[in-house]
Amino acid sequence: MHLASGDLLTSEEVEIPFDPENFELTAREHYGLGEEELEQLAAGARNVDDSFLRQGAFFADLAKRLLVKDGAHATIAFLYGPDGATAIRLEAEDQAQKYLAIQRVADKIRVNGADRLIYIAEVWEAAEDSLEPGQRPRDFPERTEALWVLALSAEGPEASRQWYTPFSRGPSEEIVLGETTSGWIAFPQFLMPVLMAWEEMWPTPPGDTRD
């Protein structure tokens, strides 16, 4: 239920067929990706443990290029499990729909056993002391924008990383990137359904040999 309006929320899932030839053509001609970068993208569909954070760093760099080229970046979640990677594009018009979409991601994790997530999104930001009680950054007139990429592992923060890039728009709406901050910044509370799914599946983090 949408608490602001009282309306019932529903979600729809649409499967989009993957066209390798069209994907490669777009990657080469529109985004200017070379052979090495295409190989790195292909590696993202494989399940290689020691490459997870390197794959996250690659997506963080690639996301900046896509943002500059297109002026926007879709919200995308990549789930990595025993059978490889699953890509999910999330579309939400408000915070309530965002929470519902993340819950669907958590449900997918329970089904396919994914233990790693790469999440890419544009976000609004504002200084906490500038917001009114209950006000979100997206509703603040002087809000700013950032590109956020998160590589989250069920093994915990030591196996996870975030890349945070503030950006602005120039006179012609061109994207002007700021400096990227990387490391473990903070756990985003809206992704709590993902963490809860992992705690249900693995009370002890995967790879933890402690009794």
Image (cartoon, rainbow, N blue to C red):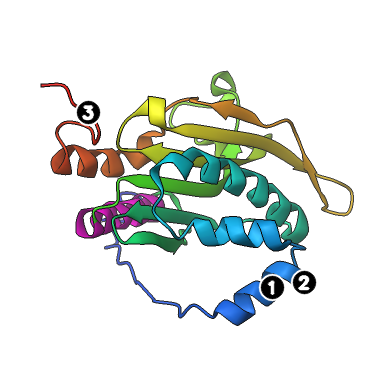
Crowd band around label 2 with a 10 angstrom C-alpha radius: few (<14), some (14–19), many (20+): few
Residue at the disc numbered 1 = 26
Q: Which residues are magenta?
A: 96-112
- In what element is the residue under mark 2? helix
Crowd band around label 1 with a 10 angstrom C-alpha radius: few (<14), some (14–19), many (20+): few
Seen from the viewer's position, the closer of residues 98 and 188 is: 188
Residue 99 seen anywhere in this rendered image of the structure: yes
Q: Residue at x 85, y 46 (%)?
A: 170
Q: Residue at x 36, y 41 (%)?
A: 191
Crowd band around label 3 with a 10 angstrom C-alpha radius: few (<14), some (14–19), many (20+): few
Q: Residue at x 29, y 51 (%)?
A: 114
Is the C-beta separation of discs 1 and 3 under 8 Å? no
Q: Please state the horizontal and vertical placement of residue 156, each as a whole percent of the image.
A: 33, 29
Label 1, label 3: how many angstroms apart (C-alpha)? 41 Å
Closest to the camera, between mark 1 and mark 3, is: 3
Residue at the disc numbered 3 = 208
Q: State whether the magenta stretch is mostly helix, strand or loop.
A: helix
Question: Relative to 171, is 35 on the left or the right?
Answer: left
Question: Callout 2, which amino acid?
Answer: Glu
Q: Please state the horizontal and vertical placement of residue 31, each as a whole percent of the image.
A: 74, 63
Label 2, label 1: how many angstroms apart (C-alpha)? 5 Å
Dot 1 or dot 3: first in sequence order is 1
Residue at the disc numbered 2 = 29
**Tag count in the figure?**
3
- In what element is the residue under mark 3? loop
Seen from the viewer's position, the closer of residues 134 and 145 is: 145
Question: Callout 3, which amino acid?
Answer: Asp
Residue 139 seen anywhere in this rendered image of the structure: no
Q: Quadrant of residue 194?
A: top left
